[in-house]
Amino acid sequence: MALTIIQIFLALIFVFSGLFIGLILALSAKEELKQGKKYLLLIQWIIPFLTLVLLVIYFNNIYVWLLILVFVLLYLFVFKYCKYFLYWALAVLFFLSTINNKLFIFASLLIFIYGLSEGSLYYYETCRQYKNSKKKGLKKLDKKSTFSVFLGLLKKNYVFLIIVVVLFFINIFI
């Protein structure tokens, strides 16, 4: 059974909310972030591998292998300059996964989990930069600064939404 537009956009909201849920988790467990950083980074290395495995399982053809090769090369060369490339690449996977219901569920969950780790790590790095900053005399983030962290996370990752929506509309009109 094909997915409806409403199902896809609800899943898109769910997937993208992983970033902000990760941020909220980081806010509520500030003390554990330093120890958990290595596990969050591990998640960010495992999720792309699992998504590639899912692509191969569900679409084992030459185009998938070419797509994987392109993503791996871009990841190796672009990731150095753009930390958020991987999350944007997961947007393409999200779009491709709409073809198969099982793949769509698995891909959505993996991207959500990746977003959890991304949101938590973003908060950790922002706090670290904030504490190291000499011009900010505060040792903790206040509510106004926390909201700016939230907006910064949105600003860094809104491209994910744009990629999915553009690909979806291209698919509809072509």
Image: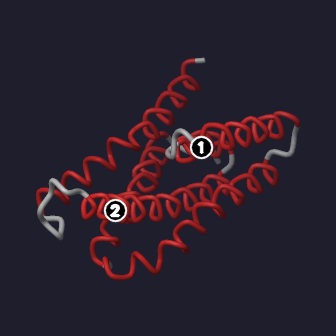
Q: Residue at x 18, y 65 (%)?
A: 141
Q: Find numbered disc 2 in the image and state the secondary structure of the residue it sits on.
A: helix
Q: Amino acid at mark 1?
A: Phe
State whether residue 69 is above or below residue 17: above
Within 10 Å of the Cα at label 1, are there few (<14), some (14-19), or many (20+) other Cα atoms?
some
Give the image location of residue 150, x and y in percent: 26, 54
Within 10 Å of the Cα at label 2, are there few (<14), some (14-19), or many (20+) other Cα atoms?
many
Name the colour scheme.
secondary structure
Q: Residue at x 52, y 64 (%)?
A: 113
Marking on residue 110: none
- For mark 2, what is the residue? 123
Give the image location of residue 12, x and y in percent: 45, 48
- Which is more toward the observer, 77 or 64? 77
Residue furthest to the front: 134
Q: Is residue 10 left or right of residue 172?
A: left
Specify the quadrant of the image occupied by residue 68.
Answer: top right
Q: Residue at x 13, y 65 (%)?
A: 138
Per the model, the C-alpha gap separating discs 1 and 2 is 20 Å
Q: In which quadrant is the C terminus drawn?
A: top right
Give the image location of residue 32, x and y in percent: 38, 81
State whether residue 50 is above or below residue 96: below
Numbered label tally: 2
Q: Amino acid at mark 2?
A: Tyr
- For mark 1, what is the residue? 79
Give the image location of residue 86, x and y in percent: 57, 46
Q: Earlier in the sequence, mark 1 or mark 2?
A: 1
Q: Residue at x 55, y 41 (%)?
A: 85
Residue furthest to the top: 174
Q: Find numbered disc 1 in the image and state the secondary structure of the residue it sits on.
A: loop
Q: Is residue 8 left or right of residue 75?
A: left
State whether residue 76 is above or below residue 169: below
Specify the quadrant of the image occupied by residue 119.
Answer: bottom left
